[in-house]
Amino acid sequence: MCTLCRRNLLTGERYRRWEPPEPQRTTLAVCALCEPEAGRMGWVRAEAGEERQGAQAPSPTVRLVA
């Protein structure tokens, strides 16, 4: 989920980690659409590169129904 727009990230969608200027200095996920807004708000991009939202495969006990 994007921290700024609260939109759920889609499988395979790219996002980056940003640090808000608050003293807690935690990294938060921000989607590509909200990156300019995060920069205007004074957030700092974390050192890690782009990440992707992953998907989990269904468990072997789950039966797929058409």
Image: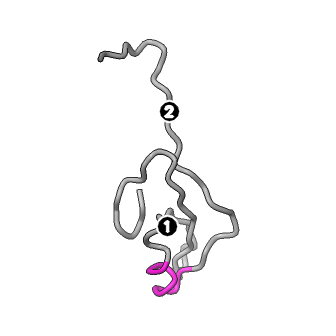
Direction from residue 46 to residue 21 in the image, left or right = left
Direction from residue 29 to residue 7 in the image, left or right = left
Secondary structure under tag 2 reads loop
Residue interval drawn in magenta: 36-43
Quarter of the image with the C terminus is top left
Answer with the quarter of the image where residue 51 lies. Answer: bottom right
Mark 1: amino acid: Ala
Q: Main secondary structure of the magenta part?
A: helix
> For the residues carrying marks 2 and 1, which lies nearer the camera in this image?
1
Secondary structure under tag 1 reads helix
Above or below, comparing residue 13 to residue 48 in the picture: above
Which label's residue is closer to the chain start, 2 or 1?
1
In the rendered image, residue 43, in percent from the top left (x then y), is placed at 53, 80
Residue beneath the point at 57% across and 73% down = 25
Direction from residue 54 to residue 2 in the image, left or right = left
Answer with the quarter of the image where residue 62 lies. Answer: top left
Residue beneath the point at 52% across and 77% down = 20
Mark 2: amino acid: Gln
Q: Nearer the viewer, residue 62 or 23?
A: 62
* Marks 2,1: beta carbons within 8 A: no
In the rendered image, residue 30, in percent from the top left (x then y), is placed at 48, 66
Residue under numbered circle 1: 32
> Furthest-front residue in view?
66
Residue under numbered circle 2: 56
Above or below, comparing residue 16 to residue 45 in the picture: above
Residue beneath the point at 50% across and 38% down = 55
